[in-house]
Amino acid sequence: MKQSFTSNHLVRYLYNEVTVSERLGLEEALTRDFGLFEEYSELKAAYRALPKVTFSPSKQTLQHVLEYSSERAALERSH
């Protein structure tokens, strides 16, 4: 049975968010379907062009989260 793959499948494949069976099916389809391979190549180029950004919260933000978590846990224990 031939499976149709969408752009969404290709994006999930790029981000390693597919199941093993989807990965195998996609890799097989990419070798047989030139149009799908072209679309994958374009998405991969765009993915590589995205800036590699990392976010780090401030110490103050982390402190607020920890305080909130402690308060919430204390509230739940009291009920």
Image (cartoon, helix red, strand yellow):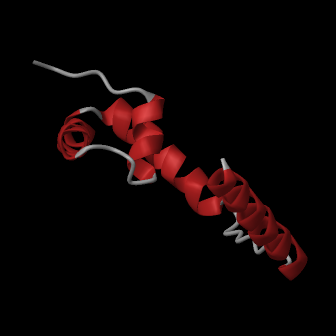
Residue 45 in the image: state x and y as whole percent: 55, 55
Residue 20 in the image: state x and y as whole percent: 20, 47
Q: Residue furthest front?
A: 78
| The image quarter in which residue 9 lies | top left
| The image quarter in which residue 6 lies | top left
Q: Is residue 26 left or right of residue 37?
A: left
Residue at (78, 66) in percent of width and height: 65
Q: Residue furthest left?
A: 1
Residue 32 in the image: state x and y as whole percent: 20, 35
Q: Is residue 33 left or right of residue 63?
A: left
Give the vertical position of 38 relative to 1 (above or below): below
Give the vertical position of 20 relative to 57 (above or below): above
Towards the viewer: 38 or 23: 23
Residue at (68, 54) in percent of width and height: 78
Specify the quadrant that holds the N terminus.
top left
Give the vertical position of 59 relative to 8 (above or below): below
Residue at (46, 37) in percent of width and height: 39
Towards the viewer: 62 or 49: 62
Q: How many marks?
A: 0
Q: Residue furthest right?
A: 60
Residue at (35, 40) in percent of width and height: 37
Q: Is residue 23 left or right of residue 63?
A: left
Residue 36 in the image: state x and y as whole percent: 36, 33
Q: Residue furthest bottom?
A: 59
| The image quarter in which residue 40 lies | top left
